Image: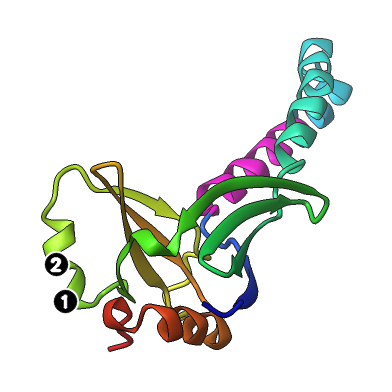
């Protein structure tokens, strides 16, 4: 089997509630500081305590996923704030059962299985082409959602053409 290599980096856009929470915490902190400075010292102290809480929620606001396809393995890592990398999972493509777009009818058979575990490593943007990769290992089914580049899709298709669909 020849060596294959593809690398894709995808920005995570799914954290809408987290963004709303961060904005809400910042507004509450500023209001407590302002109200406390003008009227009551207790609110000022609450505002001071809220400052580190607000900054700790801002700390991990930027997140992206990195897919690295080398030979017959897919490594998925998360990069937080463009500096911290953490390896999330490694999947052997020899265990790949099906790869198709998320809304494909080829996945209906797998979605009817109640023991299917879904791992979403995509951006969450509906306009992007998101693929589901179904892996079967040790009797357990996992659906991994990714946004492969055309090069990565071609590499997987070259070695596992019978299970890769792009309809």
Residue at left offset 82%, top offset 21%: 36
Residue at left offset 81%, top offset 28%: 51
**Against 64, is 2 above or below?**
below
Tell me the residue that label 1 is attached to.
Answer: 105
For this orientation, the residue located farthest to the front is 1
Between 22 and 148, which is closer to the camera in this rendering? 148
What separation in Å lies between label 1 and label 2 (alpha carbons)?
A: 5 Å
Q: Residue 143 at x, y = what percent?
A: 33, 56
Left or right of 114? Residue 158 is: right
Residue 20 in the magenta stretch? The answer is: yes
Question: Mark 1, residues whose alpha carbon is within 10 Å: few (<14), some, or many (≥20)?
Answer: few
Residue 63 in the magenta stretch? The answer is: no
Q: Are marks 1 and 2 in contact (CB under 8 Å)?
A: yes
Tell me the residue that label 2 is attached to.
Answer: 108
Q: Residue 57 at x, y = what percent?
A: 70, 36
**Against 44, is 119 above or below?**
below
Between 57 and 84, which is closer to the camera in this rendering? 84
Which quadrant holds residue 130? bottom left
Q: Residue 107 at x, y = what percent?
A: 20, 69
Question: So how many labels did they put on this image?
Answer: 2
At mark 1, the secondary structure is helix
Left or right of 117? Residue 86 is: right
Span highlighted in magenta in the image: 15-30
Residue at left offset 19%, top offset 42%: 115
Between 44 and 22, which is closer to the camera in this rendering? 22
**Against 115, is 70 above or below?**
below
């Amino acid at each position: 089997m020849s060596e294959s290599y593809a690398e894709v980096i995808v920005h995570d856009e799914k954290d809408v509630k987290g963004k709303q929470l961060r904005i809400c915490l910042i507004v509450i902190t500023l209001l407590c500081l302002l109200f406390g400075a003008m009227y009551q010292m207790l609110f000022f102290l609450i505002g001071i305590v809220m400052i580190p809480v607000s900054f700790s929620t801002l700390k991990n606001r930027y997140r992206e996923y990195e897919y690295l396809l080398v030979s017959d393995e897919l490594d998925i890592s998360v990069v937080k704030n463009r500096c911290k990398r953490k390896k999330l999972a490694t999947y052997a493509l020899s265990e790949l059962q099906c790869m198709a777009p998320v809304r494909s009818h080829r996945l209906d058979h797998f979605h009817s299985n109640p023991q299917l575990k879904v791992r979403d490593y995509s951006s969450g943007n509906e306009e992007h082409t998101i693929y589901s990769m179904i892996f079967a290992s040790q009797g357990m089914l996992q659906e991994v959602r990714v946004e492969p580049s055309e090069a990565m899709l071609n590499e997987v298709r070259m070695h596992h053409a019978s299970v890769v669909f792009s309809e």
